[in-house]
Amino acid sequence: MKTWLRRIFPGPLLSVMLFGMWLMMTQSYSLANMVLAAILGFGVPIFSAKLRPRYVRVRRPLVILRLFAVVTIDAWHSGWAVMKVLLRRVGNEDTSEFVHVPLELRDPNGLAVLALITCITPGNAWGELSMDRSTLLLHVLDGKVEPEKVIRTVKERYERPLMEIFE
C-alpha cells in the first residue's frame, strides 16, 4: 500500500471489522449509526496505530491453522482439568504456583499471541515477561503438575509454532 494511503488507513482490515462489529452490536442499521460506525472504523486505527508493535507478515499460514487447532483442543482439555481441580478441592488449600518459562521467541506480535493463548487456556495466566523478554512468569492453577511439563508444553505446543509464524 502506498505511504499516504497507509497513513489514512493504517489498518484496513481493522477498520472493516470495527465497522461491522459496531453495526452487529448495536443492531441498528440507520444512517446515523452507519456514520458513527464509519467514524469509529476510520478513527480507531489512526489513533491506535502507534500502539501496534509493527506490521505482521504472515509466514506459514498452515502452521496458523495447526496452532489454532492445538489451542482449541488444549483449551477444552484444560477447562475439564480446571473443573476437576476446583471440584476436588477440600477446604482452602491452594495448589497454584508460578512457573518460569524460558523463551526464545522475541517478536512482539508473537509474544502478544502467546499472552493471548496462555490467558485463554483455563488454569493458566500470563504473569509477567522479563525486561529482556527471555523469561515468562506463568501462573498455573494446578501446582501439582510438574513445572518441567508446563515449560515443555508452552515451548513445544505454542512457542515453536509462533516462531515459525512470526520470525
Image (cartoon, rainbow, N blue to C red):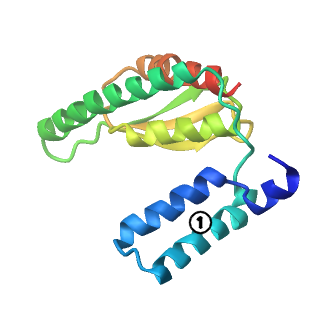
Secondary structure type for disc 1? helix
Query: In this orientation, which residue lies closer to the viewer: 3 or 51?
Result: 3
Task: Give coordinates of residue 57: x percent, y percent.
Answer: 70, 33
In this picture, residue 53 sits left or right of residue 39: right
Q: Can see residue 143?
A: no
Furthest-bottom residue in this view: 32
Q: Can see residue 115?
A: yes
Q: Residue at x 23, y 30 (%)?
A: 81
Task: Give coordinates of residue 41: x percent, y percent.
Answer: 59, 66
Q: Residue at x 47, y 79 (%)?
A: 33
Q: Which residue is mark 1?
A: 41
Query: In this orientation, which residue lies closer to the viewer: 57 or 51?
Result: 57
Query: In this orientation, which residue lies closer to the viewer: 62 or 151?
Result: 62
Under mark 1, the amino acid is Gly
Residue 34 vertical position relative to residue 103 in the rendered view, above or below? below
Furthest-right residue in this view: 3
Task: Give coordinates of residue 36: x percent, y percent.
Answer: 54, 78
Say few, some or many: other residues with alpha carbon within 10 Å of mark 1 (under 14 / 14 to 19 / 20 or more). many
Q: Residue at x 62, y 25 (%)?
A: 165
